[in-house]
Amino acid sequence: MLFSLNFTLPPIFFTNLSPQSKPFWNVPLHWRLKAKNQTSHVPKSPLCWTAEQELIQQGKGENSVEEEEEKVFHLGLEDQTLPLGLRREAMPRHVAVIMDGNRRWARLRDLPVGSGYEAGVRSLRKIVELCCQWGVKVLTVFAFSSENWFRPKVEVEFLMSLFDRGMQEDTGSFLRDNIRVSVIGDLAKLPETLQELIINLEEATKSNTRFHLIVAVSYSGHYDVVQACQRLAMKAKCGLIEPSDINESLVEQELETKCTEFPYPDLLIRTGGEFRISNFMLWQLAYAELFFAQSLWPDFGEVELLKALVAFQQRRRRYGNAPAKFKALEVACVEF
Ligand SMILES: CC(C)=CCC/C(C)=C/CC/C(C)=C/COP(=O)(O)OP(=O)(O)O
């Protein structure tokens, strides 16, 4: 029998999270493992049941800390730590993020605007890592909009060099962690060196299957729909399709998100306290759940991501009467 589970976190869950009282999953792994022989000190966390706790429980914790760390690192996805309150089977497959608030973060600290963007990259790395660990399959981030070209030249150049640097620095970890990277948007407008880097990175990671990071650069929802229309018009002009053949499925196949198996974000997160979608993935967000966070993007970390995911898992998704392709996740979310 199917039943609805309306899981609500105990108030202690978020009110207790001061920097002094970190949740158990923030405690470094070697501390947790070192504590394992001192039974009274093994944290009996009400918040999550971790893979290494499982090993201790099974009496298999006889190895050195290093061996245990190695073992935990290589456990399968389904065995990895998942904070209490998150259900793996109800995890959004595709999360989209508008990473807003980097410049405000820098100004609040009297730092140059570039430091805000650099802090934003650090935040992005952390969120990618968590999404991988927690079982999200696709993450699309809005890194530079079509409108951002109108920002001061020096800022645009800084962002271009940051993309360049970020992609070069992270190629090794994308390969090691089995992460595929795609970049979507009007890439012809980017500096040629960056275009080459993108082609190489996409090629190098195209067979990776654990996680798909999609970076939207020089992108807007309007741009995406227009370029899809142009491609369909070309096909019609060449006689490959009739105008009357054009339907939702054909449009979907021409959108930039054709690179992923899950083109429709289940969850859109916007940081920075604004309540808009700012011309991001207009077609694809049709049935996304929206989550607006007050945190500026560089401050958006584990606790904030967890709040967004827990909120998502508590939503009841209805989709109107949309076709089954949208509905797969509803079963996991509502009928647990
Ligand atoms: C390598 C890589 C993918 C890097 C991504 C870097 C990054 C965080 C880009 C965000 C860019 C951007 C225009 C954000 C909007 O917020 P804003 O900073 O304009 O916010 P604000 O003016 O509202 O504070």
Image: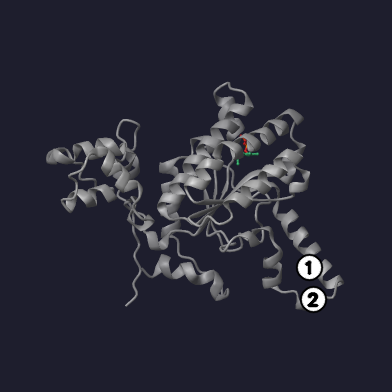
Q: Residue at x 85, y 72 (%)?
A: 238
Find residue 113 and report its horizontal and vertical position in percent. Answer: 63, 27
Q: Is residue 112 left or right of residue 219?
A: left
Residue 302: image quadrant is top left
Say whether mark 1 is within 8 Å of ligand 1: no
Q: Type of residue at label 1?
A: Leu
* Contact flag, marks 1 and 2 (Cβ < 8 Å): yes
In the image, is 188 to the left or to the right of 325? right
In the rendered structure, find residue 241 and report the number of the disc placed on it.
2
* Residue 11 in sight in this render: no
Outermost residue to the right: 237
Element type where label 1 sits in the image: helix
Mark 1 and mark 2: span between their CA atoms?
Answer: 8 Å
Q: Could one spot residue 171 in this view of the protein?
A: yes
- Tell me the quarter of the image containing the C terminus: bottom left
In the rendered view of the protein, which quadrant contains the N terminus?
bottom left
Residue 85: percent from left, percent from top: 34, 54
**Residue 271 image point, x, y percent:** 54, 43
Q: Counting other residues with Cα less than 10 Å from the Cα at mark 2, is it few (<14), some (14-19), or many (20 or more)?
A: some
Residue 232: assigned label: 1
Q: Kindly identify the amino acid type of the residue bearing the numbered disc 2.
A: Ile
Category of crowding for the residue at label 1, using alpha-carbon neighbours closer than 10 angstroms: few (below 14), some (14–19), many (at least 20):
many
Quarter holding ligand 1:
top right
